[in-house]
Image (tube, coloured by chain):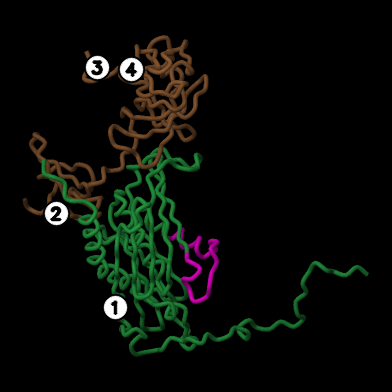
């Protein structure tokens, strides 16, 4: 295997735009491609005509929650109007620092938006799968939504302290006390359902 | 008659300030080789020792040693802006902080940031800002903290180099590395990368062209991102000084590149070709 080329920010990578398309970790200037990270130069043939050139480091590039990304978050506080969460993972990459997000009452589910009660959808400490709808503005946090079947509470603990099992899209049951609690549950992926 | 107890009355006869300035003991020798064996009027920067990735808690870090000047820099981020009113929707914000350890200078300092440190922090920020691709990090802030462990001259120049290395080590996208270099103009000759004594020593004999200059330079893009000068220098001397600093930066560039490459290779094996 030929040794991979290492480069530093600002280093001129060998091709101009005629040969390659710029990918991540690079920038274009005067028609030439320069590196913007200190890492390995990777040239991939994506199947299109031109190969994509990018610079990667082993540590996954710091991902920021972007609009449309599925994020995993933990509910920190609830309020009749919204729920505040800490965003922990973006996709499958863990974030080193926690970003704050808000799930408004009308974004909890797609139907009967005005009849939603946050107390019956989330509780503090729940792990929720949500999607970013907006970066928010200066004063607010990231705006998230769970208004899809696959989004919602994934892991929740009952008042007795045991991890609950989902029964249907709006209830979860505690295995120890057998009490049912209301949550907006995310649809379980088919591969995890036992017959 | 009520006496005036609040005002401090000065002496009735005033005298010139220069009478009371005590001449510094160290004066720059006007010619010949410098104290550490380097030459005047030659682009002779001190050999530099650089290491990246030494602070495990920080996202990125770098340590630089030039002669006896030792600096360490840590980078944290991108993280959510701590103060809501400073959040910028379109691009990230850079916060730079430069501090001198109390034991760094010949005279013991304090841990609280003085006005000189605040000034230097602002200069570090100004030098780094054009180089970082802030538009890729909206709504976030990146913290750069430089600490000078021992100051033996041109602390600002090395702080800028150290900070840009730490940013590259943290994986923050930059247009180019920023290198710093400083000179001390002493009459007709210049001393590049001055030591503490050379920086603070003064020559009362030759009055003109006494000053120091620090330049921060982006070598690949050939742009200057920061310029700081002290003292009194003529126009041509100043421009010649800037050119000398740029030459000094180019001399430093291969060493810095090698250190970064070493850090990347040490931190991670090359990704498998897929």
Report, in whole angstroms, how far the alpha carbon at label 3 lies from the one at label 4: 19 Å
Question: Which residue sits at x=17%, y=50%?
Answer: A32
Q: Chain of mark 3?
A: A
Q: Are marks 3 and 2 in contact (CB under 8 Å)?
A: no
Q: Quadrant of residue B88?
A: top left
Cα–Cα gap, marks 2 and 4: 44 Å
**Of the numbered discs in the image, which one, if any, rests on residue B44?**
1
Q: Tell me the shade of chain B.
A: green
Q: Between residues A179 and A78, which one lies in front from this camera angle?
A: A179
- With B114 as the anchor, is A142 left or right in this view? left
Which numbered marker is on residue A5?
2
The reply to whether callout 3 and callout 4 are in contact (CB within 8 Å) is: no
Is residue B123 positioned above or below B30 on the image? above
Residue placed under numbered mark 4 in the picture: A148
Name the chain under label 1.
B
Residue at image mark 3: A193
- To the question of a shared chain for discs 3 and 2, the answer is yes
For residue B54, above or below residue A73? below
Disc nearer the start of the sequence (3/2): 2
| Magenta region, residue range | B100-123
- The chain in brown: A
Rendered-image quadrant of the C terminus of chain B: top left
Q: How many marks?
A: 4
Q: Chain of mark 2?
A: A
Q: Residues within 10 Å of mark 2 (few under 14, many from 20)?
A: few
């Amino acid at each position: 295997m030929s040794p991979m080329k290492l480069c530093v920010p600002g280093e001129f990578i060998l091709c101009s735009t005629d040969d390659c398309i710029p990918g991540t970790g690079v920038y274009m200037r005067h028609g030439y491609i320069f590196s913007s990270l200190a890492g390995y130069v990777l040239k991939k043939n994506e199947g299109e005509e031109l190969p994509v050139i990018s610079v990667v480091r082993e540590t996954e590039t710091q991902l920021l929650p972007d609009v449309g990304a599925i994020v995993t978050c933990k509910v920190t506080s609830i309020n009749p109007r919204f729920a505040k969460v800490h965003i922990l993972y973006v996709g499958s990459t863990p974030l080193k620092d926690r970003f704050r997000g808000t799930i408004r009452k009308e974004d909890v589910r797609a139907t009967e938006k005005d009849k939603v009660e946050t107390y019956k959808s989330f509780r503090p400490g729940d792990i929720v799968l949500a999607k970013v709808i907006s970066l928010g503005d200066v004063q607010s946090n990231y705006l998230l939504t769970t208004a899809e079947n696959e989004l919602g509470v994934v892991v929740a603990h009952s008042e007795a302290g045991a991890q609950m099992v989902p029964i249907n899209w709006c209830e979860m049951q505690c295995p120890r006390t057998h009490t049912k609690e209301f949550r907006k549950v995310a649809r379980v992926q088919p591969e995890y359902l036992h017959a | 008659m009520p006496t005036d107890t609040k005002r401090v009355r000065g002496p009735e006869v005033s005298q010139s300030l220069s009478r009371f300035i005590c001449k510094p003991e160290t004066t720059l020798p006007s010619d010949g080789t410098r104290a550490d064996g380097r030459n005047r009027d030659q682009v002779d920067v001190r050999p530099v020792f650089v290491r990246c990735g030494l602070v495990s808690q920080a996202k990125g870090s770098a340590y630089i040693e030039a002669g006896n000047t030792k600096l360490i820099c840590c980078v944290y981020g991108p993280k959510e802006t701590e103060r809501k009113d400073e959040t910028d929707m379109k691009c990230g914000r850079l916060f730079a902080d430069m501090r001198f350890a109390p034991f760094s200078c010949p005279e013991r300092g304090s841990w609280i940031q003085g006005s000189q440190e605040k000034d230097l922090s602002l200069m570090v920020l100004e030098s780094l800002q054009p180089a970082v691709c802030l538009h890729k990090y909206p709504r976030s802030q990146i913290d750069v903290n430089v600490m000078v462990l021992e100051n033996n001259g041109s602390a600002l120049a090395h702080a800028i180099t150290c900070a840009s290395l730490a940013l590259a080590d943290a994986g923050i996208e930059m247009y180019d590395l920023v290198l710093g270099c400083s000179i001390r103009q002493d009459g007709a000759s210049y001393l590049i990368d001055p030591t503490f004594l050379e920086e603070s020593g003064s020559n009362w004999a030759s009055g003109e062209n006494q000053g120091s200059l620090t330049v921060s330079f982006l070598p690949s893009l050939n742009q200057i991102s920061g310029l700081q000068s002290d003292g009194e220098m003529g126009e041509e001397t100043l421009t010649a000084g800037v050119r000398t600093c740029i030459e000094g930066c180019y001399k430093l560039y291969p060493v810095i590149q090698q250190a970064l490459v070493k850090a990347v290779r040490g931190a991670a094996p090359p990704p498998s070709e897929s």
